[in-house]
Image: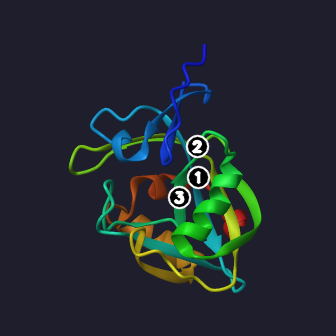
Amino acid sequence: METHTPVTADHVVTCDDAGNKIGTVARAEVHTADTPLHLAFSCYLLDDAGNLLVTRRALAKKTWPGVWTNSFCGHLRWTETAEDSLVRHAAHELGTEVRDVEVALPDFRYRAVDATGVVENEICPVYVAHVVGQLAPHPDEVSEHVWAPVDQVRAAVEATPWAFSPWMVRQLSEIPRRQLA
């Protein structure tokens, strides 16, 4: 039974274990020590030379501030598909467009607790896409970014997993190498 709550302007969609939408929570209030399961996505962005964009989360972020992570991620709104949300977040977080969007891990799900006790608890399909044009990262989202060869990124994550977001560490170990080529 759906228990949809009123949708706020900036919200996160909560879901049951099967990924069915059940409600919304204001984004500013959702991440706590008891974060409900919610819908999200992660994206790995490649340039035309095959380099992978790695971003450092802004220091003002509530979860994992200052941690290096995948290109970008975000939460779905009630009326969005993951792909719609991906396009919206590419524009907002990185000031760019994407093309050739492919799902790499359709059933990815994780729960992680950061050093402050804040929990991420997401059903989070993982995508790979290509950048269109230049980046103009939003400073409230991204503090730094770098384009690097995929093999170098994989090696860095394997050597120093503590320096990267827990979702990126798991995702990179599961994404087939051919999809990030």
Quarter of the picture holding the N terminus = top right
Classify mark 1: helix, strand or loop: helix
At mark 2, the secondary structure is loop
How crowded is the residue under tag 2: few (<14 C-alpha within 10 Å), some, or many (20+)?
Answer: some
Q: Name the one closer to the observer, 29 or 129.
A: 29
Residue 60 % position (x, y): 29, 65
| Amino acid tagged 1 | Glu
Badge number at residue 73: 3
Task: Name the kind of residue labelled 2 in the image.
Answer: Phe
Q: Residue at x 75, y 62 (%)?
A: 101
| C-alpha gap between disc 2 and disc 3 | 13 Å
Q: Which residue is mark 2?
A: 108
Q: Residue 47 location in percent, x, y?
A: 67, 81
Position of residue 122 measured from the top left corner of the image (x, y, whole percent): 49, 40
Q: Which mark is residue 174?
A: 1
| Residue furthest left in the image | 116
Q: Which mark sits nearer the N-terminus, 3 or 1?
A: 3
Q: Crowding at label 1, few (<14), some or many (≥20) Cα neighbours within 10 Å?
A: few
Q: Are marks 1 and 2 in contact (CB under 8 Å)?
A: yes
Secondary element type, mark 3: strand
Q: Is residue 109 above or below residue 5?
A: below
In the image, 108: left or right of 118? right
Q: CB of mark 2 within 8 Å of CB of mark 3?
A: no
